[in-house]
Image (cartoon, helix red, strand yellow):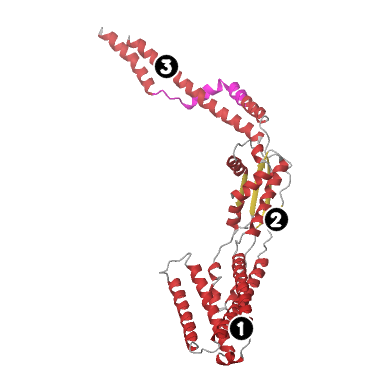
Amino acid sequence: MSQNNSTSQDHLAPLDQQGDDDGIDLLELLTILAARWRLLLVAPLAAGTLALGGSYLIAPTYTAKTTFLPPQQQQSSAASALASLGALSGLAGGMAGIKSPADQYVALMQSNNVEDRIVDRFKLMEEYESKYRFEARNTLEKNVRISLGKKDGLITVEVDAKNPQMAADIANMHVTELRRLTSELALTEAQQRRAFFEGELKRTQIKLVEAQQILQSSGFNPGALKAEPKAAAEGYATLKAQATAAEIKLQTMRRSLADTTPEIQQQTTLLGALRAQLSKLEGATSDIKNDADYIGRYREYKYQETLFELFSKQFEIARLDESREGALIQVIDIATRPEHKSNPKRASIALTSTFAFLVLMLIYFPTMHILQKAKKIQAIKQELAV
């Protein structure tokens, strides 16, 4: 009896060792694959062929591309001209640190303003079968790629569409809409200066006409000019104009800086000094009663006249700088009708499907062999245990 038990244990020992090593060595793996070499050859090719045939059911996509150079900023003439204007020199100084607007141009072409006009122009809600406008915009964003070259600074617009002509038209439409927006918005440093001085010039012109009419209605008075010499009146007007410019600059700085910053405190001190000088000049003539009304009107007229001259000079400089920036977008490559589809890439689909199916089969057959081997060993163990 003991001899039979020992014999059973001798038979079980190798099986236990086999159970501990249920893996597969290289030779066995090659044997398994060699036995199925025809299937490994034919099945992946069949899968690739089916994938190639299925790719013809996918509607072709065409890609059109346009490349352009955004407007460049130039600030050299503005800096030299503003240096001679005292308090007005800092008025546009806060705008000089603006970076290249290339990133802004990219953002503008991706704005709802531009996308909505493109959606309406090409009836993309019907083309994309969208129920809502935002759905058409989202689909448009997926089909449009806008990139900015880090080295060359060029902006590239690529558009995918099922219709090749539509792809080219949508790409060119982005450039057209960008031109429209840049003509309406002040983006560059020169455009911002031009817009600012244009507004100030219009307001000052209205006040100058009013001051001139009031001065003419009072009549010419030689005694008033003797009591308050013309040079002194003009000096007062210039000083008041500088104080006004300093006050405008302070208001502009407070939009982005706190009152405790050194820049704000320095500008506040300058404005206080100018106002103190104005008060001193006004006090020196406060005791003059004769023709004081005429003197005040004359001062106001010269003040508005000085402001008008300063603003008109800066407005012309800003317009010159804006023209030098090349406000017209310079298109390098116009989007044309694509001659060949960009998607689907049928050769890539067929090769990828063939390789993927081959890999799956190379994994499947050894795995199934290991599982079957493990089941057989387990069945033998159960029979011997009985």
- Going from N to C along the chain, the mark reached first, 3 or 2, is 2
Quadrant where the image shows the N terminus: top left
Q: Can residue 353 be seen in this view?
A: yes
Q: Quadrant of residue 310?
A: bottom right
Q: Single out the mark in the foreground, 3 or 2.
A: 2
Left or right of 198 on screen, residue 12: left
Q: Is residue 285 magenta?
A: no
Q: Assign a secondary structure to mark 2.
A: strand
Q: Mark 2 points at which residue?
A: 331
Magenta-highlighted stretch: main secondary structure?
Answer: helix
Q: Pointer 1: what residue?
A: 218
Left or right placement of residue 54 versus residue 87 in this view? right
Q: In this view, does 163 lie to the left or right of 236?
A: right
Q: How far apart are marks 1 and 2 (CA)?
A: 59 Å
Q: What stretch is highlighted in magenta?
A: 21-44
Taking 80 as reference, is 255 above or below it? Answer: above
Other-residue count near label 3 (Cα within 10 Å), few / some / many at <14 / 14–19 / ≥20: few
- Name the residue type under label 1: Ser
Mark sitting on residue 375: 3
Residue at 40% across, 16% down:
377
Upstream in the sequence, badge 3 or badge 1? Answer: 1
> Relative to 120, is 266 above or below?
below
The answer to which of 39 and 148 lies nearer the viewer is: 148
Q: Is residue 101 above or below residue 299?
A: above
Residue 382 on image: x %, y %: 35, 12
Q: Position of residue 60 (x, y in %)?
A: 68, 35
